[in-house]
């Protein structure tokens, strides 16, 4: 056996690289799979049903927006399950006997907006919205996101939806 | 190729290709295999760290999530765990090889000591890693190991306090073990490994044989390294798959006993501790000290330049003796576990508990109050707990102090009702009550079999069960009119003359009301029931939950109750 035989050397080189690559892939593939899995998985599961906000009459709604906390009875987050979790807030208004709700999440980059005398204001980048949620001033590209509300047996039911921040169209996350 | 040349030049790689002074050999693969295994630990460790959460409330849940819910999580976790074992094995072989070859001798003493240091660090890695899962095995391993450490003269208390982060095991125990496991130890191992390898390379390998022309490292030695790596990893991979990763016991529970066993590299010490009896503390510290001390001082003990094993029988004999002591103690430890019949039973129970906890974690999630509360997410857990605490004393079939009818699976079904009507004061029914001995006790119902069956069907229909036979119920109502109405009513809310009103008997509302106040005129009445009114003690919501459980019991069997899991 000649150590410097070119054919043999080539065979040894190819074998070394193949074995090394095989071991490397067997290690890296399962590892990357684990790391990547949560990227496209539903790891946080909120309520699938509308949330009860109590009797409409007791909420004492008016033309001026009223902020309410949106609380989920149970939220599963990866390995945990928690009860009565605050998901976010909504602003409720009563106009012509009809309740409407706006998400308190700014459609620009997801900061929390507040009611500021005559309009909604996002303190992060000064986006401003009218009482109906319509966009008055950017940088937000769309108005505030409305949340579906219904009244059942006199009680207000709100469906919590989180929309993708940014852009002019609403896509649920 | 041009780019590669340019890179080589700028990276100052333009030196001569590496040469092996004494030719290639499989004897030289150990270092590279260990490096590869360290990479396996690093890569899988990073992946695990993207999920693992070091706190007493979350550690077990996050590990169970990796093991049971993440795609291939068990595989990565298994590679990380058993890869650590592989490091200990390969490092052990490397150590034996070095000792036999006499490669610790001048001028390689530093390399030898750095290698011993690495072995100690790797063992510390295994110990801290084992705690992190915070299941019964990891938790009790921490208890025992730190208990031994606390026995260190003078500094014991300080060592333990620093390790667990205060006076008791808690969140800081895990954050500290985690910091050591994923930051301090990797940094230390990397540093020591760097010097171990650099110095070893400067000195060159200990010549295995005499006179041979130098050969280039690449590819003749490289291919041997690659084969060794591939074989090691294949064995590791197959083993991990055969074990479905690595076990995970039920969550750490300081109140329940557990047959804790240390990781295998420490089993010999575990056995030694048993043999040592009252001197266990001394044995647990002195034995590793003797063994470690011997290895550290080898270069001083065996100073001659002679490296042929045949000429070093004395030193190698002691070395072999120490190793065989470790080996036989390890075997003895496993053998005594295998021969312990009671242990097997306890371990089966522990495994069932673990399977239960992990299954509940998958279906219901781990409560944020901590992983032990996962058991409370079992079906009707709250009701069953209250029932066991408040009701079984008088209604349990095994109760020493039974005062009322037995309440268990099948309670209130057709067979139960039939038997009750035939022998109201039978042992499983009113026999143990004060009422049974009085004139007011219910008399056995003596009816033709068909009439009795119709009456049973009527009473059964009061539970609200949907499978009642309407024709039989109608006939049963007539039987009831003729045989029962002297004492019982079936009209809602009406107080009966002497026996309880049977409206809704065995339904959820009936039970809720009965538990709240058995002495109510619609139930047993003021004087006939010994059972206390629970309306104040047990809230309406909880009584309703117990009632739900009682309704469930009607159609349940012992197996169904067992399937709900332990409380």
Image (cartoon, rainbow, N blue to C red):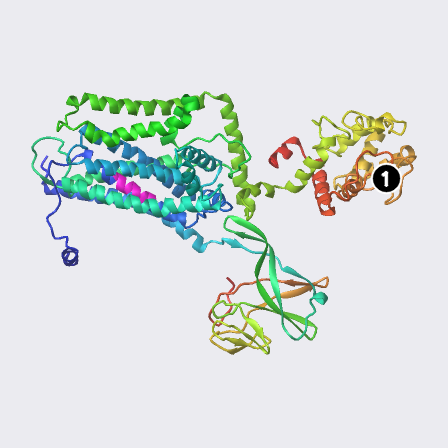
Question: Could you tell me what secondary structure mostly forms the magenta stretch?
Answer: helix
A32 relative to B402 in the view: left or right: left
Host chain of mark 1:
B
The N terminus of chain B - image quarter = bottom left
Question: SS class of the residue under badge 1?
Answer: loop
**How many numbered badges does the structure rendering display?**
1
Q: Is residue B555 left or right of residue A76?
A: right
Above or below B7: residue B17 = above
B27 vs B289, nearest the viewer? B289
* Up-down relation of residue B492 to residue B100 (above or below): below
Q: Start and end of the magenta stretch?
A: B33-41
Whether residue A137 is in magenta: the answer is no
Instruction: Classify residue A39 by image quadrant.
Output: bottom left
Residue A6 horizontal side relative to residue A88, left or right: left
Going 72% across and 47% down the picture, which residue do you hit?
Answer: B541
Q: Which residue is mark 1?
A: B501
Quadrant assignment, res A40: bottom left
Rendering coords of residue B382 (x, y %) = 65, 42
Image quadrant for the C terminus of chain B?
top right
Residue at x-position 22% and y-position 29%: B298
């Amino acid at each position: 056996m000649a150590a410097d035989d070119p054919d043999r050397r080539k065979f040894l080189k190819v074998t070394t690289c193949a074995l090394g690559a095989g071991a490397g892939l067997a290690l890296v593939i399962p590892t990357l799979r684990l790391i990547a899995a949560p990227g496209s998985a539903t790891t946080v599961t909120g309520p699938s049903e509308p949330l009860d906000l109590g009797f409409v009459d007791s909420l004492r709604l008016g033309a001026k927006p009223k902020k309410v906390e949106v609380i989920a009875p149970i939220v599963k987050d990866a390995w945990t399950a928690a009860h009565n979790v605050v998901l976010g807030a909504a602003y409720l208004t009563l106009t012509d006997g009809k309740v409407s709700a706006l998400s308190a999440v700014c459609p620009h980059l997801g900061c929390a907006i507040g009611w500021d005398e005559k309009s909604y204001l996002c303190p992060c980048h000064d986006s401003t919205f009218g009482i109906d949620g319509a966009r008055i001033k950017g940088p937000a590209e769309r108005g505030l996101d409305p949340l579906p509300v219904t009244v059942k047996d006199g009680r207000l039911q709100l469906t919590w939806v989180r929309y993708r921040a940014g852009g002019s169209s609403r896509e649920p996350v | 190729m041009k780019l590669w040349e340019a890179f080589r030049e700028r990276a100052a790689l333009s030196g001569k290709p590496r040469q092996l002074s004494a030719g290639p050999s499989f004897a030289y693969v150990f270092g590279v295999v260990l490096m590869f295994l360290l990479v396996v630990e690093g890569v899988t460790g990073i992946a695990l760290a993207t999920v693992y959460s070091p706190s007493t409330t979350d550690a077990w849940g996050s590990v169970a999530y990796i093991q049971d819910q993440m795609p291939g999580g068990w595989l990565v976790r298994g590679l990380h765990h058993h890869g650590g074992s592989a490091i200990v094995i390969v490092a052990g072989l490397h150590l034996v090889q070095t000792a036999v070859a006499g490669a610790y001798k001048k001028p390689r003493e530093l390399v030898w000591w750095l290698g011993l240091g690495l072995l100690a660090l790797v063992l510390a890695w295994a110990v801290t890693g084992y705690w992190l899962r915070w299941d019964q095995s990891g938790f009790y391993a921490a208890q025992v190991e730190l208990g031994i450490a606390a026995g260190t003269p003078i500094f014991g208390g300080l060592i333990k306090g620093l390790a667990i982060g205060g006076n008791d095991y808690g969140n800081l125990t895990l954050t500290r073990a985690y910091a050591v496991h994923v930051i301090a130890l990797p940094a230390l191992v990397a540093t020591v490994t760097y010097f171990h390898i650099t110095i070893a390379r400067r000195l060159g390998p200990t010549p295995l044989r005499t006179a041979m022309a130098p050969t280039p490292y690449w590819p003749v030695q490289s291919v041997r390294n690659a084969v060794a790596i591939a074989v090691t990893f294949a064995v590791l991979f197959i083993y991990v798959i055969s074990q479905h990763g690595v076990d995970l016991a039920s969550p750490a529970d300081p109140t329940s006993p557990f047959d804790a066993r240390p990781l295998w590299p420490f089993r010999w010490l575990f056995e030694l501790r048993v043999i040592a009896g009252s001197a266990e503390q001394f044995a647990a510290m002195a034995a590793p000290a003797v063994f470690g001390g011997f290895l550290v001082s080898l270069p001083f003990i065996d100073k001659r330049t002679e490296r042929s094993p045949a000429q070093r029988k004395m030193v190698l004999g002691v070395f072999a003796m120490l190793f065989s002591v470790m080996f036989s103690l390890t075997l003895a430890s496993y053998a005594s576990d295998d021969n312990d019949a009671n242990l097997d039973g306890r371990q089966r129970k522990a495994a069932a508990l673990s399977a239960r906890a992990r299954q509940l974690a998958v279906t219901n999630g781990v409560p944020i109050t901590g992983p032990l509360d996962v058991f409370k997410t079992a079906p009707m857990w709250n009701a069953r707990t209250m029932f066991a605490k408040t009701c079984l004393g008088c209604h349990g079939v095994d109760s020493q102090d039974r005062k009322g009818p037995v309440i268990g699976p099948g309670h209130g079904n057709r067979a139960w009702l039939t038997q009750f009507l035939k022998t109201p004061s039978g042992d499983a029914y009113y026999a143990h009550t004060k009422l049974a001995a009085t004139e007011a006790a219910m008399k056995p119902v003596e009816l033709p079999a068909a009439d009795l069956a119709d009456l049973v069907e009527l009473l059964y229909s009061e539970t609200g069960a949907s499978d009642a036979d309407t024709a039989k119920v109608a006939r049963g109502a007539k039987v009831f009119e003729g045989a029962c109405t002297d004492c019982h009513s079936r009209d809602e809310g009406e107080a009966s003359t002497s026996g309880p009103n049977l409206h809704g008997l065995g339904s959820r509302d009936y039970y809720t009301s009965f538990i709240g106040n058995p002495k109510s005129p619609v139930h047993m009445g003021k004087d006939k029931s010994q059972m206390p009114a629970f309306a104040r003690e047990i809230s309406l919501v909880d009584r309703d939950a117990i009632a739900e459980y009682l309704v469930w019991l009607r159609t349940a069997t012992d197996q169904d109750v067992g399937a709900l899991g332990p409380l």
